[in-house]
Image (cartoon, coloured by chain):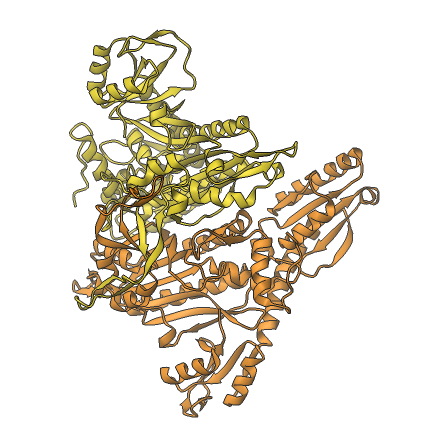
Chain colours: A orange, B yellow
Amino acid sequence: MSKKLTSRAEDYSKWYNELVVKADLAENSAVRGCMVIKPYGYAIWEKMQDELDKMFKETGHQNAYFPLFVPKSLFEAEEKNAEGFAKECAVVTHYRLQNDPDNKGKLRVDPKAKLEEELVVRPTSEAIIWNTYRGWIQSYRDLPLLINQWANVVRWEMRTRLFLRTAEFLWQEGHTAHETKKEALAEAELMNDVYAKFAENFMAIPVIQGIKTESERFAGAEETYCIEALMQDGKALQAGTSHFLGQNFAKAFDVKFANKEGKQDYVWATSWGVSTRLMGALIMTHSDDNGLVLPPSLAPNQVVIVPIYKSEEDLEAITNVANTILSELRGKNITVKYDNRTTHRPGAKFAQHELQGVPLRIAIGARDLANGTVEIARRDTLTKEVVAMEGLSDKIEALLKTIQKDLFNKALDFRNNHITEVDNFDEFIEVLESKTGFVSAHWDGTAETEDKIKELTKATIRCIPLEGIEEMGDCVYTGNPSKRRVLFAKAY
Amino acid sequence: MSKKLTSRAEDYSKWYNELVVKADLAENSAVRGCMVIKPYGYAIWEKMQDELDKMFKETGHQNAYFPLFVPKSLFEAEEKNAEGFAKECAVVTHYRLQNDPDNKGKLRVDPKAKLEEELVVRPTSEAIIWNTYRGWIQSYRDLPLLINQWANVVRWEMRTRLFLRTAEFLWQEGHTAHETKKEALAEAELMNDVYAKFAENFMAIPVIQGIKTESERFAGAEETYCIEALMQDGKALQAGTSHFLGQNFAKAFDVKFANKEGKQDYVWATSWGVSTRLMGALIMTHSDDNGLVLPPSLAPNQVVIVPIYKSEEDLEAITNVANTILSELRGKNITVKYDNRTTHRPGAKFAQHELQGVPLRIAIGARDLANGTVEIARRDTLTKEVVAMEGLSDKIEALLKTIQKDLFNKALDFRNNHITEVDNFDEFIEVLESKTGFVSAHWDGTAETEDKIKELTKATIRCIPLEGIEEMGDCVYTGNPSKRRVLFAKAY
């Protein structure tokens, strides 16, 4: 298989698909719409999980685990949620296979092993969790209940793409219960903020925090907060959502508590999640025509050292130096790999590490040994420099921080250059057709206008930005009065 | 709900079920046979995962993720494996629900959304993984392939018990591919050894390593290694298994590689796993009539500090001292919680931490402040002592190590006292009926005898111990010649 990727300019979508496979991140499986996350891709996801998990725990949350299956009667209890997910549910109807009498060596579903009640494979876990919370919450002393779950979920999507939209995906889902509306709203905002911090500080992805319009809300939510990112092709990507669920699930599952005055009241709820979709956002924000570009914070290997040698003696001498560098870098908690494979030439190693986005590559040859130098190559800028061995680990440490910051700033500049304020619909269409990111425009607040614009342009309202300024204007489509601009874009 | 548990002597099984629920480890869910793992139970499982994951990575394994679903045609490809699991498979047959025209507000499976091919919810992942490995392995350079997956699996068990046997459970499954039979066997042994080390060093559970007889093997394996533990009621528990799969899966899924001589050959395989069942083993090995007893290595909180005060001033002074202790212990990487809840009295806190198995409890009262002392209580021995504040953190650190060792030794003594060598069948029955653990006896090596003994006594051959000594003898049942003793027991 050729390592050369289709360029982004040539075919962005093809570039993405090829990169995911060739950089060994994921591949399609034998199961329609389900992916295999390969070890290198999974290692990045594990780093994301570690950081997010730490942030959840620091904000007082605990992990737990709830069943994969939701009995149909529970699934349908909260109507809006059920309606939102019913069309894409994998349903277990039987609990046994048997030898197929008509096909030797084959199995078939045992018709006698039909379940009394069908089980839905969770597309999200509000139903099963709120049914459980009923037993956990009696009084205000049991609140707030702050729980997160790392799990797989299934949504039977018809059009799938690796990481971005798959029938099964991995995610975390927080589910919290509170005494008051105010506290639940504060929790939903807090967790959206945690997501924004994670995206910006670790993924180096600038995001816009906002709230969704009613038609873009999570099924069953009263308010959906989100973080929206912009990909290099000018399409937006919803990177995380945090929902204020009101008392909808508490009412559907009869979860009441005795408040401080001793009165019974329904509990207030939130839920929030990010998924392996973040991998797609990470790839599409930073990578280039040579392959993956990873921010140092999430790179499984932040540094790779490649020896360049002709003789066994050279290799031995280089390895001695490499070992010193390895131990110094590890002492600074920098992950580093010594790629001394004898099955591959240096050129092939360089190409692989470039394709896989290792932030820094150190090459050491015999001449370097003589000069007391090494060659450092930055993946993000594709620049090389020869530097002194002395003080190398400090230099590397500083460079990794610089790369992290540079990646964020580059993405921020791109994003900021791709938010266009428009005040008439011709311009709106023109900006969208030239694929240039977010369009900031006035909207009259009706679902009707939102739908019409979507129909005409394929653009949706990504969010009503939290930091938006009150500014009177006319709806870009109807001309009706509007109090603030919202962000439109075509989206993943 | 009363916190008092049924005693082990009264009803061991009831004691276990009550303990799991009252110590907030897990509970049954609305889904038949599926459990909810509560935050406290999940925190223990997370500690197990962390340690195991480290051990897997140190032995060269990487994590990855494969689909939850196995298409029926792949599932049935390896015949023995399919036969072994077909009877307990959850099967997805449809991918959509719709409004039920006969029942307003209810949903039903959409008959038009029937899958062309049924999907089995993975009971284990050999089939889907080996189908994937075909694309990953071409040459000896791609070997060994050392992969692990953390996942949920489903086996439709008819009789379930929290942690010990549930329809859905969490586990890890390693799946490796090798050039030679010898290497694959070595891998299977290595991972069984990793499991044994984990059980003994972290769970403080002594285990016997052995191999399974043919009838107790994993479906599709050519050899199954295992670690067997003994519970306090004298029943054995299989705590982990590691399988040498020969070339069975490689042949079923056509996974060949070019060896160093350039010839095509089938790959050799292993798989190995431990699950949330380990939680059951942990609970039943160490706990007592007062509740859970946890080895310090796996306790979410190794130490809890409880202030005992009458006035706000006392509390403030105690909190100052507690903060010093907290920071000293945390500096030693000891996990410690300051339980300053105002909603509970000290007695209630003591009872809760005892029930939940916190290894060490420190109580600080006003008199302690005056004397420069604290009271330390050990959960495992239920003993208390008053010790000087000075040098406290060193003392605590040493005590935690002592507790870890003492728990192991206690369990080891119990286990060793419950292995009985017997040489005739009357004695065999007598030992088993008095519920005293493993019976070491000669067996003629036939499945027929094994079945007969099982039928008569409910005891199975837990394993042929790896460390067993060659010793000629007569089969305890048939009198036929035998080369070594095997271990029988009733088992979970």
State left or right for residue A93 relative to residue A299. Answer: left
Count the marks: 0
Task: Please name whichever residue, A151 or B85, is drawn nearer the observer in this view of the structure.
Answer: B85
The structure residue drawn at horizontal position 28% and vertical position 19%, both measured from the top left corner, is B448
Side (left or right) of B83 relative to B64:
left
Residue B48 pos. (x, y %): 41, 39
Residue B372 visible in this rendered orientation of the protein? no
Q: Residue A6 occupies which quadrant of the picture?
A: bottom right
- Between A300 and B380, the residue placed more toward the observer is A300
Can you give x and y, in whole percent of width and height, for residue A110 in the image? 26, 45
* Residue B121 drawn above or below residue B202: below
Rendering coords of residue B160 (x, y %): 24, 39
Q: Is residue A328 visible?
A: yes
Asked if A445 appears above or below A62 in the picture, the reply is below
At 63% across and 66% down in the image, what residue appears? Answer: A8
* A344 with respect to A280 (left or right): right
x and y, in percent, of residue A222 in the image: 32, 72
Q: Is residue A490 above or below residue A330?
A: below
Quadrant occupied by the C terminus of chain B? top left
Where is residue A187, by image quadrant? bottom left
Decide which of A71, B109 is in the foreground and name it: B109
